[in-house]
Amino acid sequence: MKTGPRYKIAKRLGVTVFEKAQTQKFAVSAERTAKNKKRGRGRQSEYGKQMLEKQKVRITYGMPERQFHNYVHKALSTVHSAKPSERLHELLELRLDNVVWRLGLAKTRRGARQMVAHGHVTVDGKKSRVPSQAINVGDVIAVREGSKEHGVLTGFADRFAERTLPSWLKWDPKKMEGSVVERPTMASADVAGDLVAVLSFYTR
């Protein structure tokens, strides 16, 4: 997915959109830019705020508009015990590329998408090349046997040691495999943005 100039987008939507923008230096620069814009701009409309949140969440997960809209539609229409915002969060978090990133196998979500697309990951023993594949509770996500020594995993042990694994995931470092042990919630996995505002944007 083409996103354009990343630092410029991150300054507009927030430093959490791209991992490469999450530095102290960038945060200071973004805050300064935001203050300057605030001085020269009137109060932002509710529609504008919702649009901003929608863009923030969509770009964080790295999806084109149509695909993101499909997730929103599913969250709004599926009969589910959770609230639509919680359901949307769950759907986004249970994408294969996001799970791979959460496990620490890739430094960024974009890197996780590439890792999946290049065939380095298996789901329940079968190789998957679909980053958007929906993962279910109990599914086993592993590094393909032939990819365990691949350069894409250089430094993985250090990354995994530094990463806090979400409570809904588990990982076996010896087998290089993990699984989803429960459904992710907005409390167990940090939320990319105001999902209520996102849903409001699409239901205006």
Image (cartoon, rainbow, N blue to C red):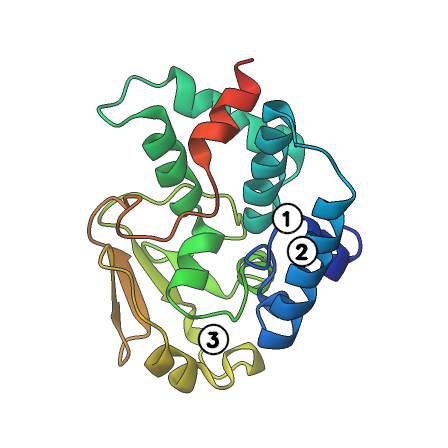
Q: CA distance from mark 1 to mark 2?
A: 5 Å
Q: Nearer the viewer, residue 76 or 193?
A: 193
Residue at the spot 66% in from the left edge and 32% down from the top edge: 43
Front disc: 3 or 2: 2
Q: Which amino acid type corresponds to the residue marked 2 in the rendered image?
A: Ala
Q: Residue at x 62, y 37 (%)?
A: 52
Q: CA distance from mark 3 to mark 2?
A: 36 Å
Q: Tell me the residue that label 1 is attached to.
A: 13
Query: Residue 10's mark?
Result: 2
Q: Nearer the viewer, residue 143 or 72?
A: 72
Foreground pick, 128 / 91: 91
The quarter holding residue 84 reads top left
Q: Amino acid at mark 3?
A: Gly
Image disc number at residue 71: none
Q: CA distance from mark 1 to mark 3?
A: 39 Å
Estimate the x, y position of residue 53 in percent, counting from the top left: 56, 37
Count of marks, rendered view: 3
Q: Are marks 1 and 3 in contact (CB under 8 Å)?
A: no
Labelled pair 1, 2 in contact (Cβ < 8 Å): yes
Camera sees residue 67: no
Image quadrant of residue 148?
Answer: bottom left
**SS assignment at label 3:** helix
Residue 134 x %, y %: 41, 41
| Residue 146: mark | 3
